[in-house]
Amino acid sequence: MPENQAAAEHPSEPVRSRIVTTQPHTARIWNYWLGGKDNYEVDRAAGDQIRQLHPGIGDYAQADRLFLGRAVRHLVADRGIRQFLDIGTGLPTADNTHEVAQRLAPDARIVYVDNDPLVLAHARALLTSTPEGSTDYLDEDLRNVDAILEHASKTLDLSKPVGLMLLGVVIFVNDDEEAYGLVRRLLDALPSGSHLVLSHTVTSPSMPDVDAAVAFWNEHGTPKLKQRTPEAVARFFDGLELLEPGVVSCSRWRPETTSDEEPDEVAMFGGVGRKL
């Protein structure tokens, strides 16, 4: 059974009261782009407007999800990782971290962390597990590192390597030094052999329509997000052994394709790094 019992039950009135249906929310729009049903009309309308500004937006939502799957499979199959701390979980969809990991290693243990009330309301879908493994969910903000680590230690053995998953979440920490500091504090608490898997929306002269889409989002949606250059995203991996091919478009991180052509670049960049 999960330690966080509130996540395993039907959403309480306090949780329902935190779900704002009159303003578009990033997790629900992401869910809409991925073909999910956990969104509202206001999210679909905003998602369609953003897609008009940047027609490829749905592609990088898909690319980010596929990057998660490839990264987790690599960590389990090739690096021997058996436990994951997934912060900024998002709404449940196909091939969540625990599903990918436990498909290869039924004894894998996963702790999910998110502070979105709608994710909490759907946390039951994230708390399924193989009998040999375990999953847990924590309703917490990325900035509360100590609380996250304290709760995670109830399910994970933090003396053994952990896969730290930060997909599309540090984009919501506007201050650069705070963002880098949060990632460093999390990594400092994990042992050698742990891995960071991180993805981030980028700004690039080659993709000006992305900037327009982000500007629209920051004017109308919540929470606000911060774009960073590919070089700034790579800085999150300072001090780590950065796995090949480095920090690249999520679509181009070890793609599983039989085509000789490189996949199209998307404005979501990601990488995987090993703590030495």
Image: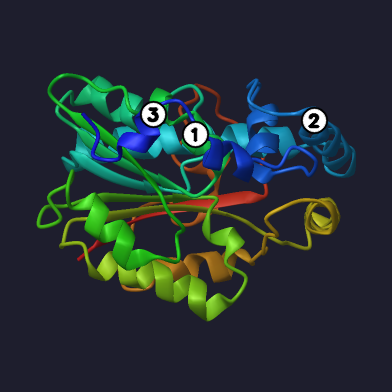
Q: Quadrant of residue 51?
A: top right
Q: Which of 180/150 is in front?
A: 150
Q: Amino acid at mark 2?
A: Arg
| 145 displayed left or right of 64 | left
Q: Indicate which disc, 3 or 2, sits on the residue closer to the N terminus.
A: 2
Residue drawn at (63%, 25%) of the image: 38
* Circle 2 or circle 1, nearest the eye: 1
Q: Indicate which disc, 3 or 1, sits on the residue closer to the N terminus.
A: 1
Residue 241: in sight, yes or no? no
Name the secondary structure under disc 3: helix
Whole-angstrom CA distance, mark 3 to mark 2, is 24 Å
Position above or below: 205 against 81:
below
Q: Position of residue 125 (x, y in %)?
A: 41, 23
Residue pushed farthest front?
Answer: 13
| 92 displayed left or right of 192 | right
Q: Residues within 10 Å of mark 1 (few under 14, many from 20)?
A: few
Residue drawn at (25%, 34%) of the image: 2
Q: Residues within 10 Å of mark 2 (few under 14, many from 20)?
A: some
| 256 displayed left or right of 174 | left
Q: Amino acid at mark 3?
A: Leu
Residue at mark 3: 126
Q: Disc 2, disc 1: CB below 8 Å? A: no
Q: Which of 66/148 is in front?
A: 148
Q: Amino acid at mark 1?
A: Ser
Residue at mark 2: 44
| 269 displayed left or right of 88 | right
Q: Quadrant of residue 124?
A: top left
